[in-house]
Image: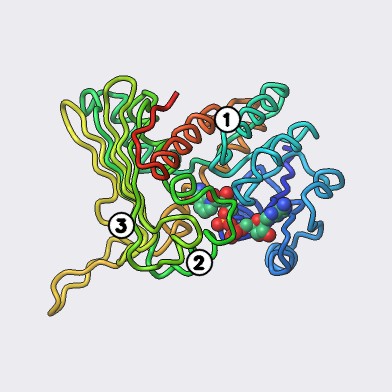
Amino acid sequence: MKKLRVGVAGLGRLGRVHAANLAYRVPGAELTAACTVTGTGVDFAKNELGVRDVYTSYEDMLANADIDAVAIVTASADHCRQAELALDAGKHVFCEKPLGVDLDQCRRAEAAVERHPELTFMLGFMRRYDASYAYAKRKIDEGAIGVPYMVKATAMDPASAAADFIRYAQAGGSGGIFLDLGIHDMDLMRWYLGSEAVEVHAMGATFRHPEFRAAGDDETGAAMYRFANGAVGMMHIGRIGPHGYHVETEIVGTEGIIRISAVPEKNLAMLYDKNGACTECVQGFQERFADAYLAELEQFVTCVLEGRKPGVTVYDGTASTKMGFATVESWRTGKIVEIQ
Ligand SMILES: NC(=O)c1ccc[n+]([C@@H]2O[C@H](COP(=O)([O-])OP(=O)(O)OC[C@H]3O[C@@H](n4cnc5c(N)ncnc54)[C@H](O)[C@@H]3O)[C@@H](O)[C@H]2O)c1
């Protein structure tokens, strides 16, 4: 069977994970090209992945590479423009979250997807492909917790990686902590509650690293959402998880509660000693969601090869960005913001 030839754009923290998956682990895919604007990315693609066709310009890769599809893992502010260029060039698109950092960009991406119904577009909300998150969704759909009326979400990057996230905030283009990190929880709230958010009140705090504030961002974010069906969302996100990468979600329903990853365990081992019982925690998104990153790309490639539409659409990207954008406005102004 013919393999899908993919070119990856962006070889940073996550681009390398996707590139390695496409090169070695996704049946049906072949990593035939890569592009990045940093020298270390070029070396990685050539030496670690054996990709010969490596570009330092996205446009050059689109025009010249032998590819059927692109995986866009560049800065968030570039996603929509690059997705549109790829679709207009006849390539299928896997695009990392967030879809965009403002709504005009998202609408342009929607229009490009609609112009090309023959092509596949998928957005990388990988948590939906994590075994525990997918299990929770199945249980909710089966009625196991009655009517879900609240989602409580926590997402903290590890304090050990704070320097990386400070650089990331300083570089700009990520949209800030709410659009960069909180967007996952916004997507999950919509998915689990089956409704759209209509109102948000957000705030932030910075206690350890003033560099976040200096970069126009915040170290910690908190937000409350009201949904159209009356349900409530509560979100806590941050960059200084003391024990590791802590992503925990609780879905509360009229007949039960589902709690995912209350302790972000590295594995099932527990060390018992004079300090008590201790389990190590995962230290980053790459480790916690390794299986989900692979599963979502498998889904993308299968959808392209079988002509099926993926579960995460460009409209999920716009809806979550709309929520994210309103959240940022509320954080900036201190006011409750309606989401229209
Ligand atoms: N789904 C997740 O859990 C998750 C986790 C991390 C990052 N992300 C998303 O992935 C994207 C990349 O994040 P990252 O942490 O890997 O960032 P990063 O800064 O580590 O890497 C960005 C990469 O993009 C390249 N790049 C920038 N502009 C380019 C261009 N015009 N053409 C080609 N390459 C270009 C850079 O050279 C670099 O290799 C972001 O949109 C981020 O939101 C998603």
Q: Is residue 219 left or right of residue 84?
A: left
Query: Does label 2 or label 3 sit earlier along the sequence?
Result: 2
Question: What label does residue 56 carry, if any?
Answer: none
Q: Between marks 2 and 3, how big is the CA–CA gap?
A: 21 Å
Which residue is identified by label 1?
314
The residue lying toward the viewer, choosing from 65 and 187, is 187
Above or below, comparing residue 162 to residue 307 in the picture:
below
Kindly identify which residue carries mark 2.
Answer: 164
Q: Name the residue nearer the viewer: 167 or 54.
A: 167
Q: Residue furthest bottom?
A: 274
Q: Residue at x 55, y 61 (%)?
A: 170
Q: Report the amino acid beneath label 1.
A: Val
* Secondary element at tag 1: helix
Relative side of 338 to 79, left or right: left
Q: Identify the residue at image location x=80%, y=57%.
A: 55
- Find residue 168 and report its image quarter: bottom right
How far from the left and from the top, in percent, is residue 172?
Answer: 58, 55
Number of the label disc, if any, that sits on residue 264: 3
